Amino acid sequence: MRKLLLESLLKAPLTEAPPSPDDGALAELAQSLERASRRRLGRSLAIREVDAGSCNGCELEIHALNNAFYDLERFGLKFVASPRHADVLLVTGPVTRNMREALERTYAATPDPKWVVAVGDCALDGGLFSGSYGVVGGVSAVVPVDLHIRGCPPKPNALLKGLIALVDG
Amino acid sequence: MTFLSALESKGSRVAAQRPWPRVVVDAPTWRQAVIGLAAGEATLLGLWSDGEAVHLALHAPEPPQLLITSLPCPARRFPSVAIAHPPALRLERAIYDLYGLEPEDAPDKRPWLDHGRWGMRHPLGVPEPVPAEGDTYAFHGAVGPALHQIPVGPVHAGIIEPGHFRFSCNGEAVVRLEERLGYVHKGIDGLMRGASLDRAAKLAGRTSGDSTVAYATAFAGAVEAALGLDTPPRALFLRALMGELERLANHFGDIGAICNDASFSLIHAHCGILREHVLRVADVGFGHRLMMDCVVPGGTAVDLAAAGAQAIPTLMRTIRRRFPELVELYDSSASLQNRTITTGTLKQPLARQFGAGGFVGRGSGRAFDARKLPGYPPYDDLRFEMVVRQNGDVDARVWVRIGEIAQSLALIEQILERLPPGPIRAHEDLPAPGQAREGLALVEGFRGDVLAWVRVAGNGTVAHCHLRDPSWFQWPLLEAAIEGNIVADFPLCNKSFNCSYSGHDL
Ligand code: SF4
């Protein structure tokens, strides 16, 4: 273990230079968010991830944000375990009928001001699963959405660009 | 005569089914199949419906190895399998929820995937409109003066899929765990009906995102069997290459996450780096980090890019240099092993009875790997060993993964050496068969064997498709493995199983 730790100290970090915020995201946020609430939340945001019906592909890439290459926490963004501690809900998947109430309750349990980021093509409009008896649709069919990050699943860099726009916008 | 061939001789063979036989049987023969399953003469591979009949897939080592028995259900009921063979229980409940075919004398009649939220019962059978108010669910619980319950989920604390766990505890010790799943039910069986093969392949690849290659390969294999297509050899090797990259990425993720749940974040961090390396190489090689939509019926959608072919050997060197240090660290950290050894033990007879696949089965002595048996190309030409451990605890499931990483590296090396030249797709447009054809395939994903059964209609669209995740036979075993462990060890046990929610909920 000592060798591993020592090497980590001596070697250059793996963490990559941050991407610049996504222009589209900035534009979408400018429309949906008041500057005042942004100032109140400041540069440090607590994120609660909610899988509302995803295939789990989106979760895998959200997970990757915590690895040494992307290191999300350096931007003041961190994942928290409870919606009560969260400023941002990061919601994936087409919202299934069986998850609708859980998503509504999670949203209600998140204190104001709060933002909702819908991650993935499914979260936009139900994606490939829209039209099924088991699916309500995209996230905005259930709770108001401030920002969409597209992709199936979005690459970690795309997620970073969208999330940085939240704190930099 | 073997058990399966005896069963086969009692039914009438369905000519449209490939490559393994499917026979239509009467109720007494169906019951014989069930009794044989209960006696351990065969393993349950799947139980599903197409709305008209129920299909039971059985596996045994002797020929024909795999057999589907089908029982038509004109009265919309069938003799319960679970009454004698518990591994069928949730599959039966799902059949009733979706298709309204009722398992007679079933030991558990509670809905499973249907939470009372769809606005109808039996959406794929004869739908009955009902208010979407949500059902209350009667958990089994456990009774005793000192017991208390802990409800967890569906929304969990981590970045994971949703499901509900109900713990009945005596102080710290778990007396009973009951799972309630179905939260991410998207209705994939229903979406498959009438879908074009292209769209269906995409849906199959999104049944469980972490196993997208395994699912797409299983679906493609089933379609190719149904249509009698010869898949180009290069495509078969590319699929195996993608499959092994997927296995590597997931095993690194799992080993890291298990250690993290034992508060050993150093290994988690390093495994996360290795996983990221694999995904980046997949992206360079095939244009998608998870390799979604890269495998299609008839072949593969993409060839290995030149840059990917160069990046893979570098990746292998990196893994071979870095991973042994992590294994040594795991093996020599008493604090970590204290958490994993003898924790969450799954007994061998249970693993056998449930036909548990992947690291769950192989960690409990069940030597089964669909790449070996029944086997499929190109694995029958490649050398690798099945990694089996006997102890059945969290530690055993970690070691199976560690062993399989080495095997995957060896496989990737052979695949690259022998990658045949030639086309990657047999046909640009798959031929419509003119009449209904059926196929089945079994593919070893990182978490176990994925079964795909498809009926292709005469016009070349999907008439019916059933995808069975390995988790169906692993989730119930988690309930058994946690018994007597402390609540605080649940995350560790759960991670070591790493069952799929989406793959199971469909
Ligand atoms: S967007 Fe793609 S990866 Fe994300 S949940 Fe939907 S299908 Fe899965």
Image (tube, rainbow, N blue to C red):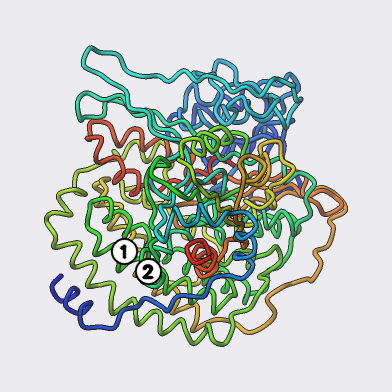
Q: Residue at x 49, y 38 (%)?
A: A106
Around disc 1, counting alpha carbons within 10 Å, would you say few (fewer than 14), some (14 to 19), or many (20 or more)?
Answer: some
Which amino acid, mark 2? Gln
Place of residue B138 in the rendered image (x, y in percent of width and height, measured from the top left):
46, 17
**Does the CB distance between marks 1 and 2 fall below 8 Å?**
yes
Which amino acid, mark 1? Gly
In the picture provided, is B285 more to the left or to the right than A47?
A: right
Of residues B328 and A132, which is closer to you in this image? A132
Q: Quadrant of ligand 1?
A: bottom right
Mark 1 beta carbon near ligand 1 (under 8 Å): no
Q: Is residue B248 visible?
A: yes
Q: Residue at x 11, y 56 (%)?
A: B334
Please determine whether, in this image, residue B60 is positioned above or below residue A41. above
Of residues B138 and B67, which is closer to you in this image? B138
Chain on which label 1 sits: B
**Callout 1: SS:** helix
Q: Residue at x 48, y 50 (%)?
A: A88
Place of residue B458 in the rendered image (x, y in percent of width and height, measured from the top left):
85, 50
Place of residue A80 in the rendered image (x, y in percent of width and height, measured from the top left):
37, 49
Chain on which label 2 sits: B
Of residues B117 and B32, which is closer to you in this image? B117
Q: Which residue is mark 2?
A: B407
Q: Is residue B58 visible?
A: no
Q: Which residue is mark 1?
A: B403
Of residues A63 and B376, which is closer to you in this image? A63
